[in-house]
Image: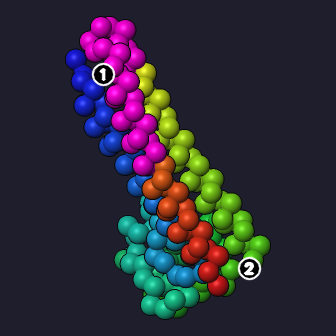
Amino acid sequence: MATIDEFLQDATRRMDRSIEAAREHFNSVRTGRASPALLDRVQIDYYGQPTPLKQLAAINAPEARLLTVQPFDPGSIKAIERAIQESDLGLTPSNDGKVIRLPVPQLTEERRKELVKLVRGMAEESRVAVRNVRRDVMHHLQELVRNGDVGDDEERRAEDRVQKLTDEHVKKIDELLKHKEAEIMEV
């Protein structure tokens, strides 16, 4: 029989994963600066298999507004270039046969606002994920009471702890969001 502490540990683990996922999503959103994480979502059709770009090439940011992609297999350069062009990043690749250069243009005010909306949506998805974990745990706690495994007082204390945990995780997501918004709006 699972105990209250086990439910709380599981909830903490799942909420932490939601925060990690939010952090990764935020990193894949373009700001004015070049960051290799921008290309994390780009998939290349490599011999019929969708493959993440970072498995096929070395990605670097030698300057604040430039990314370089150096494929491990020079034969894949055209496929990588096509995948980057077709992505929603708005980057225009140019290659010299060995290295693909991606100049990262300055963001327009309108595009910055679109990105802030996108990031807020991602943050809301993460908050919903955290609240779903809370809902699951609350449901399990109520089952424990119904089965007579714990008393009402223990359940109430555990619910308070779960709520506190939820509030802490939502606050962390909000801090990540605030930081990312500032990064996007920075000119």
Q: Position of residue 114 (x, y in %)?
A: 72, 65
Tell me what residue is drawn at x 42 percent, y 78 percent.
59
The magenta segment: 140-169
Report the number of numbered marks: 2
Q: Which mark is first along the chain, 2 or 1?
A: 2
* Magenta stretch encompasses residue 144: yes
Query: What label sits on residue 108 in the rendered view?
Result: 2
* Magenta stretch encompasses residue 147: yes
Q: Quadrant of the N terminus?
A: top left
Q: Secondary structure at mark 2?
A: loop
3 vs 72, nearest the viewer: 3
Q: Is residue 61 left or right of residue 33?
A: left
Q: Position of residue 111 (x, y in %)?
A: 72, 72
Tell me what residue is drawn at x 42 percent, y 49 percent.
168
Placement of 159 over or under 131, stated as above or below = above
Label 2: how many Cα within 10 Å (few below 14, some 14–19, many 20+):
few
Tell me what residue is drawn at x 37 percent, y 8 percent.
146
Q: What amino acid does circle 2 point to?
A: Thr
Which of the 4 image quadrants contains residue 88? bottom right
Label 1: how many Cα within 10 Å (few below 14, some 14–19, many 20+):
few
Q: What amino acid does circle 1 point to?
A: Glu
Q: Secondary structure at mark 1?
A: helix
Query: What label sits on residue 102 in the rendered view?
Result: none
Q: Quadrant of the C terminus?
A: bottom right
Q: Which residue is mark 1?
A: 154
Tell me what residue is drawn at x 41 percent, y 41 percent.
164
Q: Please tell me whether mark 1 or mark 2 is closer to you in this view.
A: 1
Q: Is there any visible trace of residue 123 in the rendered image?
A: yes
- As measured in the structure, the alpha-carbon distance from the residue carrying label 1 to the one carrying label 2 is 54 Å
